[in-house]
Amino acid sequence: MLEPRSPAPGASSALWTSTAAFTACFAVWTIFSIIGLGIKDELGLSETEFGLLVGTPILTGSLSRVFLGIWADQLGGRRVLALVMLLAAAATFLTSYAESYGELLVAALGIGIAGGGFSVGVTYVSKFFPTDRQGTALGIFGAGNVGAAVTKFLAPFVMIAMGWQAVAQIWAAGLTAMAIIFLLLTREDPDEVARRGKGQRAATMAEQLSVLKNIQVWRFALYYFFVFGAFVALALWLPRYLMGVYGLDVETAGVLAAFFSVAASLFRIYGGRLSDRYGARSVLYVTFAMSVLCTFMLSYPPTTYIIEGVRGPITFRTSMGLVPFLVTIFTLGFFMSLGKAAVFKHIPVYYPNHVGAVGGLVGMIGGLGGFVLPLAFGALSDLTGIWTSCFALLFVLVSIALVWMNAAIRHMERAAALQGRQEPLPELPEMQGLGEQGVIIPPRRAGPIADWRPEDAEFWRTAGRPVARRNLWISTYCLLLSFAVWMVWSVVVARLPAIGFDFTTDQLFWLAALPGLSGATLRIFYAFLVPIFGGRLWTTLSTASLLIPAFGIGYAVQSPDTPYFIFLVLALLCGLGGGNFASSVANISFFFPKAEKGSALAINSGLGNLGVSVMQFLVPIVVTMSLFGALGGQAQVASDGTLLWMQNAGFVWVPPIMIGALAAWFGMNDILSAKSSFADQASIFRRAHTWAMCWLYTGTFGTFIGMSAGFPLLAGLVFPEVNAVSYAFIGPLIGALSRAASGSLADRLGGARVTFWVFVLMLAAVMGMIWFLEARSFWGFFAMVLLLFLVSGIGNASTFQMVPGIMRQEIGRAAAGQPESEWRPQADRESAAIIGFISAIAAYGAFYIPKAYGSSIDLTGSAEAALWGFLLFYLSCAGLTWLIYSGPRGLLRGLEGPAAKARPTLAVATKGSKR
């Protein structure tokens, strides 16, 4: 039967009235989170007893969801939901007359039926909407979770003014009124009306429950156990946590907990829209990944460290203040709200005739989380004496959910590959084929692409170019952030002595150099990960990993007592940004045809390199202002008396990094034909051209990144009378823009030819640097540095452009006589791997150039020795380029630039066959 294209009559009224009714039910369901505090003081309850009282309504509401959902299918959701509200209202009113702990537990069991209204409402609302709008509709309905905020915001004031008994009576009256309004404004759902008209009987309980035999449904319930169960548990536990940890009064704690409930409820609507547009699997991946990060940060208890240093013990303390805690917990609530909508997006799609049973089971398991977790929170607090133990439990729980979901999806992908199928998997593939008969699950809208033919002109014009450009610009944005975080030490290190950090010159150069060392090392591994994991997933994870050094820098620079060892670790972690370049360029190289590959890589790499200049321009500005207010921490007083907020050097990147990770996951694609193992890519290590290109790219990119890292500190030491930090961003800016703009130049003239002349100009630039350094002329020296940045940027683009041509020549010769379509994919895969690998080796320039300057100054008192060494290195690069690639006997002579246009398409293979 075809789905209706528009909602059924009465859908809007049913949706919004049901949402209001569920809001009232949720307000009653969580009432003990507030009145329980008054009861705890009145009866002298322990933490465990308090947790049991708060969780008992959650238990009843959870266990009743399966049966209430089935009854909604059998009898109609309208009458069942009204009955649920009336019964819950009666139990809530009677609670006000309970006098003992036992009587309160019995009353709490009755109140819990209000939570069962969720499965009734899901069944009722979903029947009014077509599948392509159910995610949004159920997201709106699920936003009724905000009822918890209503209770936390209003109940404390009523309880203080009139007592906890009055809260129960008023809430009972409100729920009764809502039941009457609901009956007056809604109509029976379309399925119930149709069944009555045909005189059909409803499915029996056994028929409804039969679908629950699928193990995948239970795994689905596990996801909801976290996104909903943990939300309910935190909504109940948060007031007690805020009072115990931060010493807040009940009114303030209740209001803050209410804001958490709002964030974790209203954004469920947005989660439904995202699930409709991008697919629930994508939303769940982001939800679980961000929840792992948030719960890890929240689970770390206040800790005092004592390090036995050379000059005595070094003590420092880490703890999360109230404002950072609230920001983190609200972030967690936001992603939980997205996840709740994503989970329920699929139930009416996969099981349209069993929404009550499946939705009831999933809701029951999620609700049980709201019962079990508060008990576990109280028990952990009693046993360990650590408040943050509750978040440690949630960290373990969400990590299991993420790993399990990813393992299930990867298992399905491997099974499909073994069967010779490469089509995109449907959403939540672990449920593939296990829904109801005749239900067709649509494929994902984003993610893998099986058919990718960029060299096909018609395919490229009609379908390929828009997809490739979207992936290019998202990847470029993420790469820009990666370079910014990677090189942030080049500015931070120069300011550390001014704010009280007593580090030697050698220690400062080590801090400036270590991100280059770790970034280059990580690139070696990152270069091979895109074909293994897919560019979309890896770009998302690698971008999100930048949050670690960004937060770490923000916290470490706020106290001069922070040990040097911590700065060493953070410097190494900044290398996560450097590693991202290898995977980014390897991924983008798969998307574009040969004719546009040079330009695409130049844009991706050049604008990505621009992150260095953006950082060196932005950070000196943001550290002079209280950008984040109380959230960002206190200012530091510099040696000249000015106020600096050095923590902003790290914190300023947190929001754009989050945006980049989300954009990568929701906007990028994987090319299935690019998938390969490490063993398949390892053949590049046996090719001499791989190592030759490593040498050449070290000369171009190694210079760009090394000068970016070393120039601010070098200029400050050699020309102390000039504020060189103010001009440091200009060099990387010129280098990045020249790279982005010169990709087409290498495509037209030939990469080898351009690369040779680049090294000639770099020789001239270094000779000029030596001349002006001896003359003590900063502006002459700076002009030569800018020339070096300019030509190195051009060389970065031209060396990359050489690689695809080299590999087509090499593999074409080995495959002489074979059609190009057979050996071309291997050439493209090896080209991508080589591009990533040479970028890894070249990135060591960010280490050796600052260290060369530092060692030269320590040994000779001047930087000239290092510059003479660079001069000899560029000379070797120019000679190597001429002899192997661009000279009369060079491999690329006549095969690129204007001469290549006259050659036939399969010239490589023909040439190889003659040999």
Image (cartoon, helix red, strand yellow):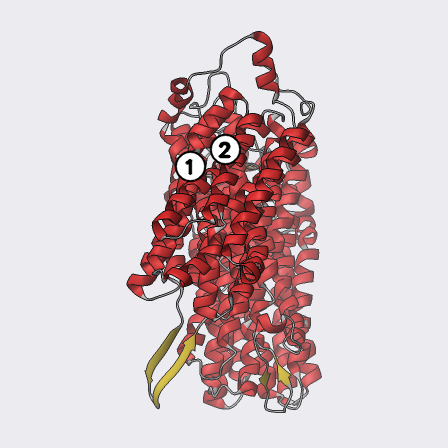
The x, y position of residue 767, in whole percent, is 62, 78
Closer to us: 797 or 376? 376
Residue, x 57% and y 58% (percent of image)?
Answer: 158
Q: Left or right: 317 with respect to 346?
A: left
| Vertical side of 44 occupied by 461: above or below | above
Task: In the rendered view, tell whether residue 147 sits above or below residue 879.
Answer: above
Residue at 51% across / 21% down in the picture?
Answer: 75
Name the amino acid type tagged 1. Met
Q: Is there a contact, CB below 8 Å, between mark 1 and mark 2?
A: yes
Q: Amino acid at mark 2?
A: Ser
- The residue labelled by disc 1 is 364
Reading the image, the residue beneath label 2 is 119
**Quadrant location of the N terminus in the rendered image:** top right
Q: Nearer the viewer, residue 167 or 555?
A: 167
- Relative to 407, is 424 above or below? above
Residue 143 locus on image (x, y percent)? 59, 43
Mark 2: secondary structure: helix
